[in-house]
Amino acid sequence: MQNGAGKVSLQNCDNLRSNGDRFRKGMLQFLELRGDTALRDWMLENTSSPNSMVDRITPRPTPDVAERVKAVTGFDDKAPVMGEKFIQWVIEDNFIAGRPAWEKVGAELVDSVHPYEEAKIRILNASHSCIAWAGTLVGLQYIHEGTKDMEIRALDDAYVTEDVIPCLTPNPLDLAKYRDIVLDRFSNPYIKDTNQRVAADGFSKLPGFIAPTISECFARGVDPDATAILPALFFRFLERWHESKLPYIHQDGVMDPGVAHAFSPRPIRSGPSPATSCCGAAWRARRCTVIAPEVTLVRTESARLVGRHARDVVQAARTVSELIRAGARYRSVRSDAWRGAVRFARQHTAPSDPLERHTQRQEMRRTLRTRAESA
């Protein structure tokens, strides 16, 4: 600004939705709070902030990666990163003073990044979580193992085909082709992406990855049975965590353990418990009255886990759909884990502004803690 160098485009590469818009809004707000109106005004007139989206699976590197890099290159890399062969970089063509010819090296320059972001988040990210939760429940360690399990793959395929694609149509992408490419990428055995990594942070993923599709299905007058399987899997996964039966340490940056434990049956017993939770997709044999007098659900028995009993999972999905649709009628939810699905689907689509998202999470925690304590 002081040297009169002219206009400049500020390209954001953060792996966030609407990253350019969010950066611009935050920077302008920062300058406003600093009282630097001159720089703020200059930024408004002389800069642009194109949105972008990058897609490449980069699993947590294992210790042998550094050794392999050194063997091939001779360089002792202290922080090696591994990634799949596939890479996609989509950039909003919103440059105020020209731009490099990034399309010559494979980048896609588009009018709007939004449909590409939505496809990635709802098809790739949500599917990743679906396979990680389901794979963990059936005793698998890696994403490629779950993707190659035909029943788990069928659950995810149905979620994308029956609910996501209709929600995102029309779209500049061939969504069916994108779905197949994503599942093929997940099947790559050389990535060795773990269920532990992908299953993490479920409380953040439900509102951003899954709830929008549920809400839009209802807006179209369609029951989101296939999508409802995903929160069913998550809460079944959460129940395993509550019982200390997960094969790894579960990490969730926004999870309040006290609230999360309240989602599941209490206390833990060696035999069948009279819990009112409807969170299972692999059901135990017992009757339970759930939430309202007019709703009685019979939990059917399956000694095996979720992925081996797709019929039970479909029943779980239908149950979730019914609870979400009728959520306004249900007032008292003791330890019912589905209240999380109801709350996320009805009230929590992730806001784009980070401050709003933080405030939303804090409010959600307070509300759920209050409900858990009064249960």
Image: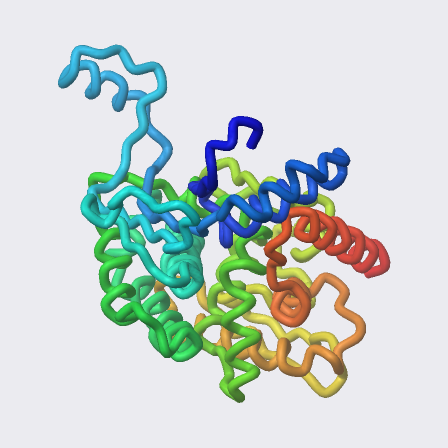
Foreground residue, 261 or 49?
A: 49
* Residue 59 left/right relative to 96: left
| Residue at the left extreme of this rendering | 72
* Residue 7 left/right relative to 57: right
Q: Position of residue 219 (x, y in %)?
A: 56, 83
| Residue at the front extreme of this rendering | 4
Residue 52 at least partly seen: yes
Q: Is residue 245 above or below residue 125?
A: above
- The residue lying at 34 percent from left, 48 percent from top is 55
> Which color scheme does this rendered protein use?
rainbow
Quarter of the picture holding the N terminus: top right
* Residue 320 left/right relative to 313: right
Q: Position of residue 143 (x, y in %)?
A: 32, 48
Question: How many circles with numbers are drawn on the protein?
Answer: 0
Foreground residue, 191 or 363?
A: 363
- The residue lying at 19 percent from left, 47 percent from top is 104
